[in-house]
């Protein structure tokens, strides 16, 4: 491939992509890129379900219950480091390269996990699997938002991110079958469970190969001819599918192309140019990570300890709970585009925090038994799941395109490192007391952390619904194109974007 030539160009690629009607191409994007969340849900739930089996004599892996906890922590560390490492590569090298590389890493590590022969090898495989999944978050969310039309970006993002819970439900259902010693030997069933994740990953890879590179990334990095070719191909396929001629695009964008943007410059933008948005994303990610990881990693133990649910039945409750989590983004998702991001994200965070209060009381007083507890738990996470998905959407769409993947990676990594580790440790310790009062206090702490996310959205949230990504945050390369003369500079310092929109210093609220 020839080296890209850079200069100052004016393009309509963003407007052309945002005006497209929903089509088979967009379904291919959803299926090819959205599968990562199903894989993550499958992985996390699978380990939780096979944990007890791995510690049994004859499992083929001499590992203790404490080491299972270490493996979970190593997976999270891998995901955080993988997000940061692959996130900055995604902004530098392109979306497609990274969403293929990270999926291959996941596949290799998952297959290797099925052949684990000792704890250290199992730990290594879990770290690499987490690194692949963490890298996927940055590459996938940035690519999705740059390919999906602005008018439906919110609901599509929420449903894709919420599909994590389909993977969780599948992992629990699969465990019921594969862990049955009547069907599979004790040292084989858990290995097949990890192998199933690899099979699903291969299917996703086959679809993903046909998803193009982001045209937005291409034209900024000196490959406008390739960007033009991809967009023209998408337009022609949609016109053939719909039998109509697409209307002309309205706005254009002028950018000074660059083949590479230094990591330091990318990082500085988030915290010097957009400090309010950075604080918002930190609050959203820490809040959802604390609540979700705290409950998810300990729900089975909580049900068995305080409600006497047998180990064999725990997956059934997790399936029901996981499906209710998926229902939240599916049912509420379109309101994030119609009613708006700020009111809906605020509702999701503060609403779930509010419902957690009677949940804690029902748990503490034992009123209504398991039925009342599960109903309130389902309602809490029906709301919280939409908020958690919206955290990824927020980080993806409110920073300049050149920093998008790294922004997702950074806030995911920090949020998971803070809330995702503190939550499980706190709830695990409180459940370990065997007393209801400490656990009820844990629910209240989780409600308080979620409330902080809701308040941050209320005061710092961005009205992003229906907005072009370039209007939400001007690309760095577009700012460079301002004030030039002859080859694209404007002597009066007017914006390089034809059609207006806030610059980096104007944070929409």
Image: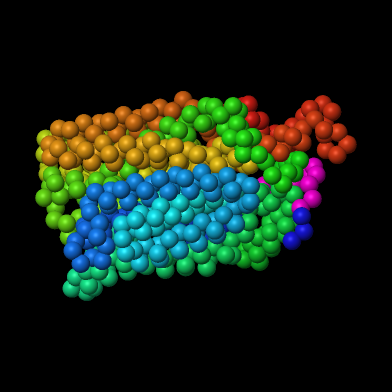
Q: Which residue occupies 62% across, 39% down?
A: 263
Point out residue 459 in the picture as x, y percentages from the top left corner. Answer: 46, 25
Answer with the quarter of the image where residue 285 lies.
top left
Answer with the quarter of the image where residue 446 lies.
top left
Point out residue 265 in the picture as x, y percentages from the top left corner. Answer: 64, 34
Q: Is residue 120 above or below residue 253?
A: below
Q: Is residue 6 one of those drawn in magenta?
A: yes
Q: Is residue 161 above or below residue 349?
A: below
Please state the extent of the stretch shown in magenta in the rendering: 4-16
Is 452 displayed left or right of 319 in the figure?
A: right
Is 236 displayed left or right of 53 in the figure?
A: right
Quadrant (top left/top right/bottom left/bottom right) for the N terminus? bottom right
Q: Is residue 99 one of those drawn in magenta?
A: no
Q: Depth check: 136 or 113 in front?
A: 113
Question: Is any part of residue 204 visible from this angle?
Answer: yes
Farthest residue toward the bottom? 183
Q: Is residue 49 above or below residue 81?
A: below
Q: Which residue occupies 40% across, 27% down?
A: 455
Q: Depth check: 247 or 2 in front?
A: 2
Point out residue 28 in the picture as x, y percentages from the top left corner. Answer: 54, 62
Q: Which residue occupies 40% across, 64% down?
A: 112
Is 188 displayed left or right of 409 in the figure?
A: left
């Amino acid at each position: 491939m020839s080296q890209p030539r850079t200069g100052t160009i004016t393009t309509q690629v963003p407007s052309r992509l945002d005006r497209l009607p929903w089509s088979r191409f967009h379904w291919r994007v959803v299926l090819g890129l959205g599968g990562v969340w199903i894989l993550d849900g499958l992985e996390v739930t699978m380990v939780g379900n096979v944990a007890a089996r791995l510690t049994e004599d004859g499992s083929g892996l001499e590992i203790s219950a404490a080491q299972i906890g270490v493996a979970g922590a190593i997976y999270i560390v891998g995901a955080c480091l993988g997000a940061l490492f692959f996130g900055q590569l995604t902004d530098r090298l392109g979306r497609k390269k990274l969403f293929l590389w990270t999926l291959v890493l996941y596949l290799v590590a998952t297959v290797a996990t099925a052949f684990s022969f000792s704890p250290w090898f199992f730990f290594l495989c879990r770290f690499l699997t987490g690194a692949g999944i963490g890298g996927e978050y940055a590459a996938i969310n940035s690519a999705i938002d740059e390919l999906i039309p602005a008018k439906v970006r919110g609901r599509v993002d929420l449903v894709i991110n919420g599909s994590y819970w389909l993977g969780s439900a599948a992992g629990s259902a699969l465990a019921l079958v594969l862990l049955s010693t009547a069907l599979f030997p004790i040292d084989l069933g858990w290995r097949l469970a990890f192998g199933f994740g690899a099979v699903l990953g291969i299917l996703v890879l086959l679809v993903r190969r046909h998803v193009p590179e982001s045209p937005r990334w291409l034209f900024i990095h000196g490959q406008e001819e390739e960007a033009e070719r991809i967009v023209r191909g998408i337009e022609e396929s949609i016109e053939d599918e719909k039998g109509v001629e697409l209307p002309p695009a309205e706005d254009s964008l002028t950018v000074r192309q660059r083949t590479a943007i230094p990591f330091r410059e990318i990082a500085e933008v988030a915290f010097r140019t957009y400090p309010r948005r950075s604080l918002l994303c930190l609050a959203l990610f820490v809040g959802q990570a604390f609540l979700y990881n705290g409950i998810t990693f300990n729900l089975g133990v909580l049900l068995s300890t305080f409600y006497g649910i047998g180990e064999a039945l725990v997956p059934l409750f997790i399936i029901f709970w996981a499906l209710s989590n998926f229902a939240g983004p599916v049912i509420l998702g379109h309101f994030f585009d119609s009613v708006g991001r700020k009111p809906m994200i605020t509702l999701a965070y503060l609403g779930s925090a509010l419902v957690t209060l009677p949940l804690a009381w029902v748990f503490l007083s034992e009123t209504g038994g398991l039925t009342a507890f599960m109903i309130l738990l389902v309602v809490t996470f029906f709301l919280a799941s939409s908020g958690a998905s919206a955290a990824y959407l927020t980080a993806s769409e409110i920073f300049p395109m050149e920093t998008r993947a790294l922004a997702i990676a950074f806030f995911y990594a920090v949020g998971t490192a803070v809330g995702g580790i503190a939550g499980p440790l706190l709830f695990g310790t409180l459940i370990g007391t065997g007393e209801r009062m400490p656990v009820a206090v844990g629910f209240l702490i989780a409600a308080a952390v979620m409330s902080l996310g809701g308040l941050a959205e209320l005061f710092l949230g961005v009205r992003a619904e229906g907005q072009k990504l370039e209007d939400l945050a001007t690309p760095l390369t577009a700012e460079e194109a301002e004030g030039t003369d002859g080859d694209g500079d404007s002597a009066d310092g007017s914006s390089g974007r034809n059609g207006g929109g806030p610059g980096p210093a104007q944070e929409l609220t």
